[in-house]
Image (spheres, helix red, strand yellow):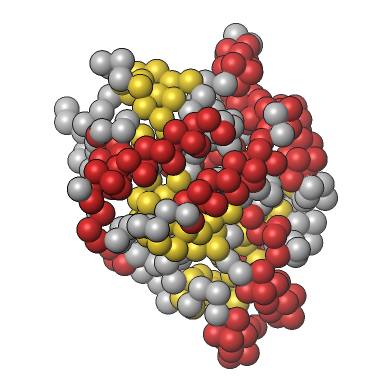
Amino acid sequence: MELFNVYPINNITITRAMGSRVWDDLETEYLDMYGGHAVISIGHQHPHWVNSIKQQLDKISFYSNSIKIPLQNVLAEKLGAVSGKKDFSLFLCNSGAEANENALKLASFHTGRKKIIAFKKSFHGRTSLAVAATDNPSIIAPVNETDNIIFLPFNDVEALTHCFGEEGNNIAAVIVEGIQGVGGIHIANNDFLQAIRKCCDEFGSIYIADSVQCGYGRSGLFFSHDYAGVNADIYTMAKGMGNGFPIGGIIISPKIQAKHFMLGTTFGGNHLACAAAIAVLEVIEEEQLIQHAKNIGDHLMNELKAIPEINNVRGLGLMIGFDVPDELKQLKSILLQEYKIFTGEAKPNVIRLLPSLALTMEDAEIFIASLKKAIAQLQS
Ligand SMILES: Cc1ncc(COP(=O)(O)O)c(C=O)c1O
């Protein structure tokens, strides 16, 4: 059987990893400034994470949500403490799309409404409502098309308030990334997020903070939405939550009441996934990785801003993007092929940096030095 060919892949086979390094089957070492698409939060194969999963594996890996799973309560307790959202409650699932799907569904159940506001350049996942709220017609199948999503320009307070003025009583939710990732690293302005909060309060709509990529400490705060100083009603999470072990979740404001069977999942919140996610939070706390991500991110951004050949350096913490002029469009591929550094991209000509939150200053320096050499090489 062949694999269904949906991914354009690099011709590299990674066989082992540690921290911010990965090695291929020929023992070539790479610096990972991409984190497998923002997934590696505490570093590849962190020993505490590996041991927690191994120990859990020897006890029980899975049972469904028909019995008590105290590890879920431990995870919820820790998540409340580390995120500061102690009075929220937790629903566990398996991926970012599933988290957003559940958040949108919950908002519709809670309000009894159908319309969702999403934004230009958004990405919320590939399942039915999540993809309908994603601003990329090429990944929306005919069956996903719906009139229930209203796309507005990002960071446009006037368009938002105008839309609420016209449609407010029909709006179930506003879904917004704190930093648009796939769209090319665009930060939601504080006044924009505050306006979303205000409109949602005025019209009884639900503010959904898609934190799948920008959450879990990556921005230098647990949720990048927190920079605006207002709470969302639901935060969706996945990528960094398990450091590569598949797990997603949503945390839900006390204003939304749970009812039996309104949400559900077979695999979500299983023993092994909880053990992985608890270990991630323990390491984040123990190694103070949120502050570390901010420090290293600030340093990287200052260094990047001093490189005249690249433009529009932006980001928060270790979620960073910059524009590459057309004459340097080979930069990402040269970095990988010749300097053995993984980076991410967004079209057109944006390089995205999404390394582990534990990236060392030394590795940040290696990246900057290699980037400068690669630029000089392309210009010569
Ligand atoms: C902001 C955001 N939301 C949702 C998703 C979907 O997550 P998953 O691929 O785990 O379904 C992604 C994935 O890139 C994302 O960046």
The answer to which quarter of the image holds residue 117 is: bottom right
Query: Measuring 24% from the left and 61% from the top, which residue is drawn there?
Result: 326
* Residue that lies at the very extreme toward the top in this rendered image: 58
Q: Is residue 234 above or below residue 250?
A: below
- Give the percent coordinates (x, y) of residue 189: 61, 69
Numbered marks: total? 0
The answer to which quarter of the image holds residue 8 is: top left
Left or right of 169 in this view: 355: left
Q: Is residue 308 visible?
A: yes
Query: Measuring 64% from the left and 43% from the top, which residue is drawn there?
Result: 295
Q: 179 or 201, which lies in front?
A: 179
Q: Is residue 278 visible?
A: no
Left or right of 202 in this view: 275: left
- Give the percent coordinates (x, y) of residue 25: 28, 17
- Give the percent coordinates (x, y) of residue 181: 47, 55
Query: Measuring 37% from the left and 43% from the top, which residue is drawn there?
Result: 371
Q: Quadrant of the N terminus?
A: top left
Query: Measuring 47% from the left and 54% from the top, which residue is drawn there?
Result: 306
The answer to which quarter of the image holds residue 178 is: bottom right
Q: Is residue 120 above or below residue 287?
A: below
* Residue that lies at the very extreme toward the right in this rendered image: 87
- Give the percent coordinates (x, y) of residue 103: 60, 57
Q: 31 or 168, which lies in front?
A: 31
